[in-house]
Image: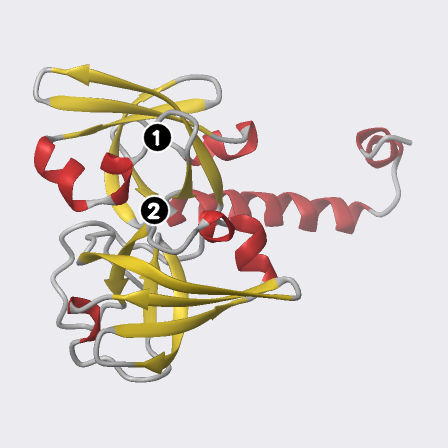
Amino acid sequence: MFTGLVEEMGEVLAIENGEKSLKLKIKCKKVLEGAKIGDSIATNGTCLTAVELGSNYFIADCMYETVKRTNLKRLKSGDKVNLEKSITLATPLGGHLVTGDVDCEGRIKSITPEGIAKIYEIEIERKYMKYIVEKGRVTLDGASLTVMKLDRNSFGVSLIPHTQEMITLGKKKVGDYINVETDLIGKYIERFMKFEEETKESSKGLTMEFLLKNGF
């Protein structure tokens, strides 16, 4: 579990492509403090397990589900990534509870200056928009941010100059891809409701209503 407060930006030192997998070597400093092999380090918001630690780097394996869902597959040597070490019970919860399980990639649709800030509009698959709430929280490349506006298949977040300097989103441009993790609470509520409906349907057995609903 993470807070969505980026501790530092690391740098990709090396990428090893396997069969439906990746091995990443990330240069860093702060997240290594007290770290042990097997610890979780959110990399662009993706929970990765450190399988090797050095004085200024860690190495992590990425399985196919991770490669498929996230923008880690788009990384090149020299790219910057947001890093956060997993929380403990003593960690201040300054952001919100983040799992490190990325839902999908988003694409930056527009970047608009507004006073001292910049508004980033992020486009995602329509099916994930139901989990995005105005003034709710969303995690972008591991950074906990507030949703300021909604559209049919996009949402906007606003970054002050300090945040632009501290996270990868501030370095990106229109058309770039970013990892998106929606708020966990909405997903659980949806599952509870659907599970109840599925239970009721299964108890009815095979009915005309069930056949019509499922395309028969």
Q: Nearer the viewer, residue 119 or 25?
A: 25
Q: Nearer the viewer, residue 18 or 142?
A: 18
Q: As drawn, is 207 to the left or to the right of 79?
A: right
Which residue is under mark 1? 133
- Residue 197, above or below 157: below
Q: Nearer the viewer, residue 2 or 51?
A: 51
Which residue is under mark 2? 141
Residue located 33% across and 54% down the image: 78
Q: Secondary structure at mark 1?
A: loop
Q: Position of residue 204 (x, y in %)?
A: 80, 45
The nearer-to-camera label among 1 and 2 is: 2
Q: Quadrant of the C terminus?
A: top right
Residue located 64% across and 62% down the image: 20
Q: As drawn, is 23 to the left or to the right of 77?
A: right
Q: Quadrant of residue 159?
A: top left
Tags 1 and 2 touching, CB below 8 Å: no
Q: Position of residue 114 (x, y in %)?
A: 15, 15
Q: Position of residue 200 (x, y in %)?
A: 70, 46
Q: As drawn, is 33 to the left or to the right of 82?
A: left
Q: Position of residue 104 (x, y in %)?
A: 50, 43
Three-letter residue code for mark 1? Val
